[in-house]
Amino acid sequence: LFVVLFSSWIQRFSEAMTPLRRPLSTLRSYIIIQEQSHYLIISNRQRIEKPPPHTLTSHFQTPTHVPGKANPSSPPRIHPTNSTHHSTMSIPADQQTTPIKKYQFVRRLKSRLARRRIRKEDEKILRAARDDATIQTEFDLPKTVKDALPDDAEKKNNDGRAIVVTECTGTFNMIGCNKAWENLCGYAECEIQGKDSSILQGPETNYDGLRDAVSRLFEGEQQATVVTTNYRKDGSRFKNLLTLGPLRDDNGKLTHFVAILKNIGDVKDAPKYH
């Protein structure tokens, strides 16, 4: 019995001493594991949490910076420690970046608040314009494309309403306008054909109000009015009382949209936007 117990004790002692017979450098070295294009650093004494994917690029990714010059946006190069160097690897504080998702959230939040502010201001201007008897806010909208853009050039150019016709699908590309619209926006008809209305829009445009107005037209309304800020070809801005309406064919099918623009005030106390 004593021999059996002694042999068992010797075996357990040998198993416990096995790690101590390994080289000390092996116990202190780090193992770098590449997992889904970013690194996870593991050591026997310290574990560094996996950094976000944007902070460390792949070890085998082709560098995009100019050789010989420092690239502050590039991540540090991390290598396993060798048998003669035992210092702890860490990411420098100046190269630790805040997650991109946080910046994206803040940017979206600021953009949403700005759009809400612009919409409230333009709705206030619209109410004031309707209360002002000197400003025309109601227009007789054309019913068809030929009514909006007549084939007779003289009739088309003598219309005092600034009219532009757009498609009702896709990006609402413009198909034509009259002379009054050209004088107001600074573009010739040949310059806008096939382009969307983004050439007239900028940071102060009431995007939410425009989106709601178009949605009301798709829901069946015959007219929608909104105030927004538009930009001329030279970059100058003006407050636009925009009246939108549907255009239909002989069968009553929606084919295009018509927009009548009215300048209710130039925006002068701001730099021009191109």
Image: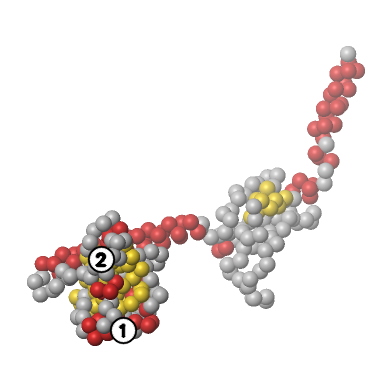
Residue that lies at the very extreme toward the right in this rendered image: 3
Asked whether, in this view, residue 25 is left or right of residue 110, the answer is right
From the viewer's perspective, is residue 203 above or below residue 160? above
Q: Secondary structure at mark 2?
A: strand
* Mark 1 surroundings: few (<14), some (14-19) or many (≥20) residues within 10 A: some
Mark 2: amino acid: Gly
Q: Nearer the viewer, residue 103 or 215?
A: 215
From the viewer's perspective, is residue 113 above or below residue 261? above
Rendered image quadrant of residue 122 = bottom left
Residue 26 in the image, given as x and y percentages of width and height: 78, 48
Q: Are marks 2 and 1 in contact (CB under 8 Å)?
A: no
Residue that lies at the very extreme toward the front in this rendered image: 250
Residue 143 in the image, given as x and y percentages of width and height: 24, 68
The residues tagged by marks 2 and 1 sit, at their Cα atoms, a distance apart of 23 Å
Q: Residue at x 66, y 51 (%)?
A: 35
Q: Earlier in the sequence, mark 2 or mark 1?
A: 1
Dividing the image into 4 quarters, which one contains the N terminus? top right
**What colour scheme was applied to this rendering of the protein?**
secondary structure
Which residue bears the numbered disc 2?
A: 245
**Disc ID at residue 186:** 1
* Mark 2 surroundings: few (<14), some (14-19) or many (≥20) residues within 10 A: many
User: Which mark is in front, 2 or 1?
Assistant: 2
Residue 17 in the image, given as x and y percentages of width and height: 82, 35
Q: Residue at x 88, y 15 (%)?
A: 2
Q: Nearer the viewer, residue 180 or 17?
A: 180
Q: Nearer the viewer, residue 212 or 20?
A: 212
